[in-house]
Amino acid sequence: MIKTTLKLALAIVLFASCNQFEKAPSGMLYKITHGSGNEKKLEQGQFVKLNLEYKLKSKDTTLSTTYGVIPVYFPIDTARLGKYTFTEILMKCKKGDKIEFSLSVDTLVKMNVLQLNETFKTKDLIIGRAEIINVFTDVAKVDADYKLEQEAEKGREIKAIKEHLAKKNITAVQSPEGVFVVVTNAGDAANKVDTTKVASVYYKGYNFKGDVFDTNMKNDSTAKPYDVSIGAGGVIPGWEIGLKYFGKGGKGSLYIPAMLAYGPQANGMIKAYENLAFDIQVQDVTPKALSKASALAPVH
């Protein structure tokens, strides 16, 4: 009798919890938890700063998140609010509100938003959450706030690199910009890398777990160095900063904060906001006028 009563009580609690969710016109299930204060609902023309996260329900896997990194900023245009997405109900919200929502993979496939594959399977759900952090009416204030978030993110990344190096007992020099450089061999001091030069570089790129995502250090005759025209913007900023610590024949390692690498953009095996490491060998350093420097980035 006690077990039956307990089961009934649990069923009532679960039913009440499910009833907290509403259905948007598109069929999306959502729940808004309003924050405290007397904030007004969002209006046309404002700019919203919010955290956003998507998880795959079946595996409890985070697909993407801005929690703990740089939030999302975007303008409110009521004529362009999405369908079957959290923006559909955004005008019901105000600063400080939290949104929970559920998206059917099958529905997203029918809308040509997703394709079924090893990650997204039929009958699965994507569970999302969003939190409205701030609201702006002036784009200049948005830009200023975003710059502060960028600096805060870079600070978190630099702290993480310092902790990683300390754990591995690695001694490195920190550049003013935040790149950590390990100089095994400084190379030719009379032929250093600078903005007038092209550096021909062999490299191995890997994450802090040691997983290699790209390299041209191969033990065969096909291995060729990458030509990097310093200052041309053809490589990630961390490379241009770190290579200047070396001359021809130099060897070492670069530990680069994500904001000086790929930042929020995932790139193949490289995750969003992932700090990176590179072992590098400077094969040659030549004047720009005497070299056909490749503008290709060192990693793909």
Image (cartoon, rainbow, N blue to C red):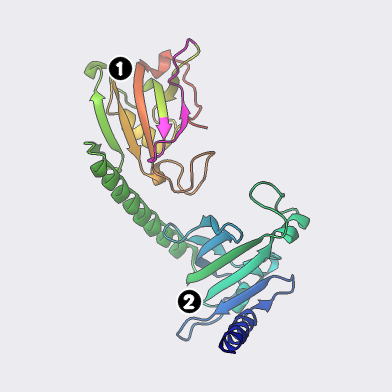
Quarter of the image for residue 233 reads: top left
Residue located beneath label 1 in the image: 248
Labelled disc at residue 293: none
User: Is there a contact, CB below 8 Å, between mark 1 and mark 2?
Assistant: no
Q: Identity of the amino acid at label 1? A: Lys
In the rendered view, tell whether residue 30 sits above or below residue 156: below
Residue 161 image offset from top left, x and y in percent: 31, 45
Q: Secondary structure at mark 2?
A: loop
Residue 184 lies, with reference to residue 40, above or below; the image says: above
Q: Is residue 227 left or right of residue 111?
A: left
- In the picture, residue 244 is in which quadrant? top left
In the picture, measured across the screen, residue 233 lies left or right of residue 159, that is right
Q: Quadrant of the N terminus?
A: bottom right
Q: Is residue 45 above or below residue 63?
A: below
Crowd around label 1: few <14 · some 14–19 · many ≥20 (10 Å): many
Q: Position of residue 7 (x, y in %)?
A: 60, 83
Q: Give x and y (percent) for residue 6.
A: 57, 86
- The majority secondary structure of the magenta stretch comes to loop
Q: Nearer the viewer, residue 216 or 133?
A: 216
- Residue lying at 46% horizontally and 22% vertically, measured from the top left: 216
- Closer to us: 70 or 109: 109
- The magenta region covers 205-221
How far across and down, in percent of the image, does residue 112 sit?
75, 53
Q: Dot 2 corresponds to which residue?
A: 96
> Does the magenta segment cover residue 190?
no
Q: Residue furthest front?
A: 1
**Looking at the image, which is closer to me, 42 or 157?**
157
